[in-house]
Amino acid sequence: MRFVRNVGWPESLKRLIAAANRRPFRRRKIAAAALGIAGGAAIAVAIVVKPAGFETQETQETVAPWDLLPAAKTRHATQHTAEAPAKSLALPLTRISVQTAPPTIIERHVEIAPGDTLMAVMLRSGSDRSTAHAAIVALTKSYDPRRLRPGQELTLLFDPMAARDGDPALIQLAFAPSVEQEIHVSLNDAGRFISKTIDKPLETSLHRAEGSIDDSLYLAAKRSGMPARMIVELIRIYSFDVDFQRDIQRGDRFEVLFEALYDERGEFAKYGDIQYAMLHVRKTDLPLYRFAMKDGEVDYFNNGGHSVRKALMKTPIDGARLTSRFGRRRHPILGYRKMHRGIDFGAPRGTPIMAAGNGVVEVAGWNGGYGRYLRIRHNGRYKTAYGHLSKFRRGIRKGKRVKQGQIVAYVGSTGRSTGPHLHYEVLVNNKRINPLRLKLPTGRKLKGRELARFQEVRGVTEKKFAATPAITRLAESR
Ligand SMILES: [Zn+2]
C-alpha cells in the first residue's frame, strides 16, 4: 500500500468533497499525440492533436428516495492518449518538404448507445466496414467487445492522408474500460491493427472522517463528509459486532481512515478501502484494522488480531427498527395468534437490504404472503430469506452468487403486509430459527508471525491516522 499524497490538501479536499456531492460535471482535456501514416508510404510524422475540451456527466444509479448508494456508479472520462511509439524520422529532408500541407489527425468521440454493437458505432463514426472489422478482430485479443456497455466512450483517430475511397482512414480505436485501464487498437507499420492494454497507475490518498452519532451511524458519517460508498462499507464491517438499532446511543463516536485514488494528473478516480475504523459504542472502543493475510485474504481485525467476520450478519439492514420478534403473536392481518418465524425490521420503502452472508440466490420472485421474496443459500447448513421486498437489485436472480454485505433488494410492503418492513428469516437445515439467538463461530485469529506482522501494520495505520486531518474540520474552514 502506497501512502502518497500527491496533491496539496486544499485541492485534494475540494475534489473529495466535489466527488462526495456528486457534482454533475467534470471537465477534462484530451491531449493526444498521434502517429500519422502518410499515404501508405513508410513516412511517419508525429502530430499533436489539439486538446479538445469536453464534458461528461457523472451518472448514478437511483435507489429510491433513500440516499444509501452502494457504489454511486460514476463514469469518469479518462485521458485518451494515442501514444506514438518513438520513431526515427530517418528520411531525407527533401522528402518531407515535398509534402505541401501537414496531415492532421481527426479525433472523434462516440458513445455506445443502448442496443449498439461496436461495429455499428464504428460505421457511424466514419470508418469503413473492412477497417472496422480488422480493428475489432484485433481488439478481441485483449478485450471482449461484448463487455462494452452503453455510455462507454470511444475515441477514434482517422488519418486523411491514408484515405480509403476518399474518406479518412481509421488508424486507432481507444477507450478506457475502467479508471485504471485503457485499451488501444492501433495500426502498425505493417498496416495491421495491434491491440494493447495500458495500465494506468493510481495514487492513493488517505482521508479521515470522524464525528459523534446523534441519530444513526449513517447520518452521522454523512455529516462528517464521508462518501456514501464508504459509509456502506463502514456499516458492513461492523455489522457482525454491532446491532445498529440497539447498540448505538446518542453521543457514541466513530472515526474512519479511508482511501481515495487519483490518476496521474491528480484527478479523482475512485474510492479505495477503509484502512481503519473505530466505533465507540456501549462505552467500549471497537477499533478495526484492515490487514492482508499471507494467503492473500483481506479482513478487518481488532487490536488483538481477532477477525470480527462471521458467516452471517445479524441485521442485514441499517437504520431499521426491530418491530416484531420471533415467536407467537397475533397476526396483524389475519387477526389470530400465529407463530412468527422471522423478525421484522420497520424501515422506509426503498431502504437497501444486504445479503447476510456469501452465497447463491435460491429464490428471487413472488412467494404468496411473503410478496416479493428472496432466499439465499449460504452453505449446506444456512439460508436466509427476505420478504415483502419492493424490488430486487438489478441482476439479482436465481443462481446469482452474492457477497456478504452486497445490496440485493429494497424494503417494500408486498404480499401480506401492513406497511413497509423487512421480514427476515434465518434457516438452519431448512428450519426457521430466531436470528437474534443465532450463535455463529467467530472468525480467524492471527497467530505467531502473522500476528506480529499485523501489529506492525496496525502501528503504521495509527500513525497515518494521526497525521491525516479530518475532512469535517477542513470542510468547515473552507
Ligand atoms: Zn415478519
Image: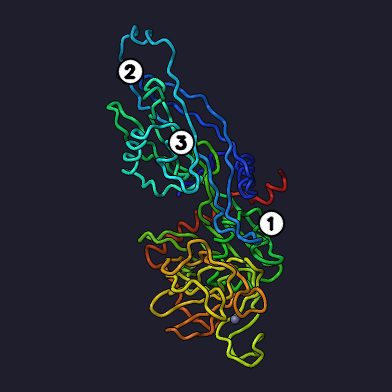
Query: Image quarter for residue 45?
Result: top left
Measured as percent of width and height from the top left, residue 476 is found at: 72, 48
The one of 282 and 315 positioned closer to us in this rendering? 315
The one of 231 and 22 positioned closer to us in this rendering? 22
Q: Quadrant of ligand 1?
A: bottom right
Q: Residue at 51% x, 31% y: name it.
A: 30
Going from the N terminus, do you reach mark 1 or mark 3 first?
3
Which residue is denoted by mark 3 in the rendering?
124
Which residue is denoted by mark 2 in the rendering?
43
Query: Image quarter for residue 40?
Result: top left
The CB of the residue at mark 2 lies under 8 Å from ligand 1: no
Q: As shown in the figure, which amino acid type bears the numbered disc 3?
A: Arg
Q: As shown in the figure, which amino acid type bears the numbered disc 2?
A: Ile
Mark 1 surroundings: few (<14), some (14-19) or many (≥20) residues within 10 A: some
Instruction: Provide the secondary structure element on which disc 1 rests.
Output: helix
Query: Image quarter for residue 321?
Result: bottom right
Q: Which mark is residue 349?
A: none
Q: Residue at 46% x, 74% y: name it.
A: 363
Quadrant placement of the C terminus: top right
Going from the N terminus, do you reach mark 2 or mark 1 first?
2
Q: Which mark is residue 223?
A: 1
Going from the N terminus, do you reach mark 3 or mark 2 first?
2
Q: How is the image coloured?
A: rainbow
Q: Nearer the viewer, mark 1 or mark 3?
A: 3
**Image check: 196 left or right of 58?**
left
Mark 3 surroundings: few (<14), some (14-19) or many (≥20) residues within 10 A: few
Task: Decide if residue 247 is in sight here.
Answer: no
Measured as percent of width and height from the top left, residue 44 is found at: 35, 20
Q: Nearer the viewer, mark 3 or mark 2?
A: 3
Q: As shown in the figure, which amino acid type bears the numbered disc 1?
A: Arg
